């Protein structure tokens, strides 16, 4: 069960040359967490292993963003995106994440994620997008939240003639 943590307004960071790495099973339960992940998220290894990866989910992140992630990786494609996470103390940290399938002997056994520090300019673009998705989710109600916010995001991207992947990769490389 995810602990009840009250978010703070304190941001934590990690060095640009550090990577947060984790692996999960097919259901999203953590099977591996590197030391950078444990340090930044402020969890010991035994507090993470076997636990749903959403233990670090910040309430500022819309459910539609995670639906997009899961739809992408469950179809065998890798996902890139910006995520605001929360530490065990309620502090937050932004990452640029790459999530891909993890295979053993040709069989998908889980997911592998590598995260690095998100550029400040990318956060300035993504934070209002996520805030609007959250507003839409609250308005739509729990049953339709994911679909409603993801539909809005899809429409915004279509109007700009850009894919989500292209948007986030451009933000990461050019922000």
Image (spheres, rainbow, N blue to C red):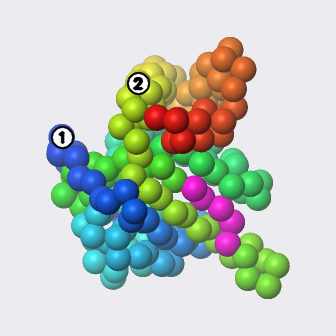
- Whether residue 135 sits left or right of residue 166 in the image: it is left
Residue at image point 48% right, 78% down: 32
Q: Nearer the viewer, residue 92 or 96?
A: 96
Q: Quadrant of residue 35?
A: bottom left
Locate residue 115, reporting x and y percent: 47, 58
Can residue 137 be seen from the camera position used here? yes
Picture disc at residue 9: 1
Q: Which residues are magenta?
A: 98-102
Picture disc at residue 128: 2
Q: Distance from label 2 to label 1 (Cα)?
A: 16 Å
Quadrant (top left/top right/bottom left/bottom right) for the N terminus: bottom left
Locate residue 109, reporting x and y percent: 69, 76
Judged by its main secondary structure, the magenta piece is strand
The answer to whether marks 2 and 1 mark residues whose Cβ atoms lie closer than 8 Å is no
Crowding at dot 1, Cα within 10 Å, few <14 / some 14-19 / many 20+, comes out as few
Picture disc at residue 53: none
Residue at image point 76% right, 58% down: 76
Crowding at dot 2, Cα within 10 Å, few <14 / some 14-19 / many 20+, comes out as few
Does 141 sit above or below residue 119?
Answer: above
Q: Nearer the viewer, residue 154 or 63?
A: 154
Locate residue 50, reporting x and y percent: 45, 77
Locate residue 155, reporting x and y percent: 66, 19
Element under disc 2: helix
Q: Nearer the viewer, residue 83 or 30?
A: 83
Tell whether position 100 is magenta: yes
Residue at image point 41% right, 24% down: 128
Residue at image point 73% right, 76% down: 103
Residue found farthest to the right:
106
């Amino acid at each position: 069960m995810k602990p009840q943590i009250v978010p703070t307004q304190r941001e934590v960071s990690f060095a640009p040359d550090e990577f947060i790495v984790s692996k999960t099973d097919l259901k999203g339960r953590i099977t591996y967490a590197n030391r950078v992940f444990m340090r930044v998220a402020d969890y010991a290894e035994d507090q993470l292993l076997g636990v749903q990866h959403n233990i670090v989910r910040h309430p500022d992140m819309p459910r539609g963003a995670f639906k997009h992630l899961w739809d992408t990786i469950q179809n065998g494609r890798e996902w890139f995106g910006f995520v605001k996470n929360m530490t065990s103390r309620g502090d937050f940290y932004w990452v640029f994440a790459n999530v891909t399938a993890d295979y053993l002997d040709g069989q998908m056994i889980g997911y592998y994620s590598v995260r690095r520090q998100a550029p400040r300019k990318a956060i300035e673009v993504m934070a209002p997008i996520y805030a609007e998705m959250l507003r839409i989710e609250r308005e739509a109600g729990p049953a339709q939240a994911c679909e409603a916010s993801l539909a809005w995001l899809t429409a915004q991207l279509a109007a700009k003639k850009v894919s989500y992947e292209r948007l986030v990769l451009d933000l990461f490389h050019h922000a």
